[in-house]
Image: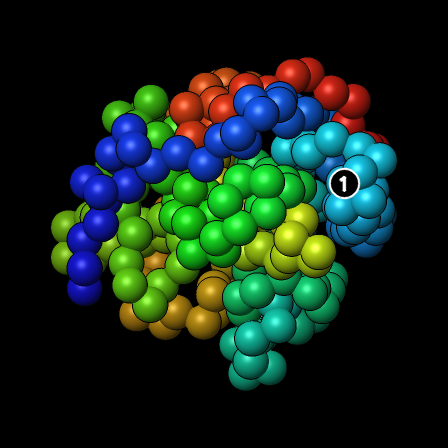
Amino acid sequence: MLDRSLNLADPAVRLARPDDAAAGWAASTGLVDYLAAEAAMEARAAAIAAGRARELVWLLEHPPIYTAGVSARPSDLIDPGRFPVFRSGRGGQFTYHGPGQRVAYVMLDVAARGHDVRAFVTALQTWIIRALARFGVVGEVRDGRVGVWVRRRGGEDKIAAIGVKLRRWVSFHGISLNVAPDLGHFTGIVPCGVTEHGVTSLAALGAPATLSEADAALKAAFVEVFGPVADARAPL
């Protein structure tokens, strides 16, 4: 496997807008219903594409659920009765969302940020890796496995997932970072279709953080990679 963690830490990895316009930055409190969040996210992405709204990064938590991306295999849903299951238009396979996990829905104008999907995904990975570094955690990426991984003795585990979709060059869906979720909840699926590696969290790695602390790290790292933000109202 190719270790690209050092390349992604390079300050040259940056996907700011040429006009340096600030993206909105919003966080919801409490647990947000998945279908309501998906509808609000898609509406906002459409408004951005139409020039009626500015870009937005929306931080939230969901109640315990499983979501299936466009590449999800039915056999990877091990315990279908455990939590609600939702089909999603994002890329990727099955993943879990729940309390203690920070979801960031990323609604950005990728056309205004270079018109390069590969560079956009690399920037998302870089964002997560730089946020993790603020807690002393080394995040890495692997060819053929989307997301961010951390090494452990005898192997490696996934700490953050990435699943995005673009419509009219505006992104939606986004990332999820395991801050302190119940990792046992991942056992009802094959996370992201990967059987030979596990999942972990900041808490499990001995780097406990509150969601507020994780948010602050994500915000600072986002500014480094994507440019300025401005506080905004959460859609829900």
Picture coordinates of residue 107 (x, y %)? 66, 41
Picture coordinates of residue 42 (x, y %)? 79, 50
**What is the residue that sits farthest to the left in this orientation?**
154
The answer to whether 187 is drawn above or below residue 153 in the figure is below
Residue 229 appears in the picture as rendered: yes
The answer to whether 94 is drawn above or below residue 22 in the figure is below
Nearest the viewer among 192 and 92 is 92
At a point 29% along the width and 33% down the height, the residue shown is: 12
* Residue 205 in which image quadrant: top left
Picture coordinates of residue 43 (x, y %)? 84, 46
Give the residue type at disc 1.
Ile
Task: Report the quarter where the C terminus lies.
Answer: top right
Task: Report the quarter where the N terminus lies.
Answer: bottom left
* Residue 208 in which image quadrant: top left
Disc 1 designates what residue?
48
Residue 103 appears in the picture as rendered: no
Disc 1 packing (10 Å; few <14; some 14–19; many ≥20): many
Secondary structure at badge 1 equals: helix
Is residue 181 toward the left or the right of residue 128 in the image?
right
At a point 62% along the width and 72% down the height, the residue shown is: 70
At a point 76% along the width and 40% down the height, the residue shown is: 48
The answer to whether 217 is drawn above or below residue 61 in the figure is above
**Colour convention of the picture:** rainbow
Is residue 150 toward the left or the right of residue 20 in the image?
left
The answer to whether 109 is drawn above or below residue 130 in the figure is below
Picture coordinates of residue 188 (x, y %)? 55, 66
Is residue 15 toward the left or the right of residue 90 in the image?
left
At a point 47% along the width and 65% down the height, the residue shown is: 192
